[in-house]
């Protein structure tokens, strides 16, 4: 699916979203335990049914053991484990985040969600304390506009939790198309994948946000401690709850009115307004460098820029570079 068609499709086809959230990468393990938890009796019944039927699987044939939240104590190794009760008390949504899968160690939260779409409720979230492998996006052109909504919801969630807890405001910014930055260093990223089945788009949203781990770059709480030493720092559960509160509102606006309804707020949170970038183009046997100034996003979700020739251009990643701002392709609008 190309991004250029996504804004048209979403007004005609329903979306089915689920989320994955992961922490630090470690060594691979051969088995995993999944704890299933629901916000209400409806989601709790779903958790019991999934456990009894033993239907959740992983793509790499890893052995899976299923538990419900009342059986979680045997899996908790220390106080840093994800607090299911705190998370459930932090969310007030109607759809998103109300069904939770938690594991102390997982190969990939994204794989758990995407491989079990047909079994999981809409809006399910998978969280792990230790992720054994990560997934990187290979081509920016297949990423739908929904990732911009997710990025915006993450930055606003951090802002809201800081305000609620009386902490200094830390300004997490968005680096197009899918990275989160703080004080010039990467602290997170977004990965969206989608499939189309039975006249519906099934979208799996992966969110990585470094809350506590100071290595190898920095984390949210390290920045907060430098600003104002405090014991009441940010917690993953509170940020995740605030994220779903923001995302549900932004998602409804996005579906009803398109991304235009969120653009003004999005531009306040991204790094690129009036940024000048060099675009290389091959003309016959010569490589020509052109300087353009970023103005915003095009309707298809790519970068809108103006050249020194006063022409408007749409900038695309060439798909060959890890950094999307290297190898940008310029197309005249």
Image (cartoon, grey):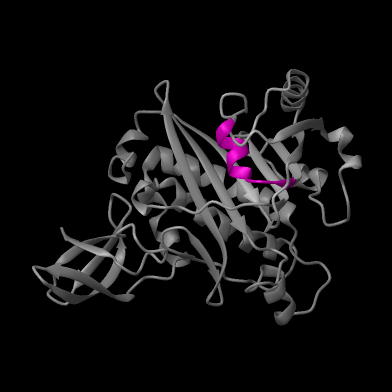
Q: Is residue 50 above or below residue 172?
A: above
Can residue 38 be seen at all in this image of the molecule?
Answer: no
The residue lying toward the viewer, choosing from 235 and 330, is: 330
Residue 116 position by quadrant: top right
Whether the magenta-drawn stretch holds residue 106 is answered as yes
Q: Residue at x 68, y 52 (%)?
A: 131
Q: Is residue 154 above or below residue 16?
A: below
Judge from the rendering whether residue 250 lies leftward or rightward of residue 215; answer left or right. left
Q: Residue at x 39, y 56 (%)?
A: 263
Q: Residue at x 8, y 68 (%)?
A: 284
Q: Residue at x 66, y 41 (%)?
A: 126
Whether the magenta-drawn stretch holds residue 140 is answered as no
Image spot of residue 45 (x, y percent):
76, 22
Which stretch appears magenta?
105-115
Image spot of residue 18 (x, y percent):
57, 37
Judge from the rendering whether residue 225 lies leftward or rightward of residue 279; answer left or right. right
Indicate the quadrant containing the N terminus: top left, top right, bottom left or bottom right. Answer: top left
The residue lying toward the viewer, choosing from 73 and 99, is: 73
Judge from the rendering whether residue 88 lies leftward or rightward of residue 4; answer left or right. right
The chief SS type of the magenta part is: helix
The residue lying toward the viewer, choosing from 136 and 7, is: 136
Indicate the quadrant containing the C terminus: top left, top right, bottom left or bottom right. Answer: bottom left
Judge from the rendering whether residue 76 lies leftward or rightward of residue 183; answer left or right. right
Image spot of residue 109 (x, y percent):
63, 44
Q: Is residue 16 above or below residue 316?
A: above
């Amino acid at each position: 699916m190309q991004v250029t068609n996504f804004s048209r499709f979403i007004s005609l086809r329903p979306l089915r979203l689920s989320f994955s959230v992961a922490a630090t990468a470690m060594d691979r393990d051969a088995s995993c335990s999944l704890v299933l938890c629901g916000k209400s009796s409806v989601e709790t019944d779903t958790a019991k049914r999934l456990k009894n039927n033993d239907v959740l699987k992983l793509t790499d044939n890893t052995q899976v053991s299923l538990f419900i939240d009342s059986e979680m104590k045997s899996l908790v190794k220390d106080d840093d484990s994800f607090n299911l009760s705190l998370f459930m008390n932090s969310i007030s949504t109607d759809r998103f985040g109300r069904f939770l899968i938690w594991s102390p160690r997982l190969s990939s939260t994204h794989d758990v969600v995407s491989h079990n779409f047909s079994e999981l409720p809409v809006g399910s979230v998978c969280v792990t304390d230790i992720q054994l492998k990560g997934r990187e996006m290979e081509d920016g052109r297949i990423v739908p506009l929904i990732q911009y909504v997710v990025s915006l919801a993450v930055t606003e969630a951090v802002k809201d939790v800081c305000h609620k807890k009386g902490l200094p405001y830390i300004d997490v910014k968005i680096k197009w198309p899918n990275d989160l930055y703080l004080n010039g260093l990467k602290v997170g990223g977004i990965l969206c994948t989608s499939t189309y089945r039975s006249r519906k788009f099934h979208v799996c949203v992966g969110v990585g946000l470094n809350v506590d781990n100071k290595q190898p770059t920095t984390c949210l709480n390290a920045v907060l401690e430098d600003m104002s030493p405090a014991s009441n720092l940010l917690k993953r559960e509170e940020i995740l709850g605030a994220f779903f509160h923001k995302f549900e509102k932004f998602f409804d606006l996005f579906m009803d009115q398109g991304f235009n309804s969120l653009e003004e707020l999005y531009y306040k949170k991204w790094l690129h307004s009036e940024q000048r970038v060099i675009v290389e183009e091959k003309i016959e046997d010569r490589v020509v460098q052109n300087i353009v100034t970023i103005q915003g996003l095009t309707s298809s979700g790519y970068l809108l820029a103006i050249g020194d020739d006063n022409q408007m251009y749409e900038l695309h990643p060439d798909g060959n570079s890890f950094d999307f701002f290297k190898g940008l392709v310029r197309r005249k609008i």
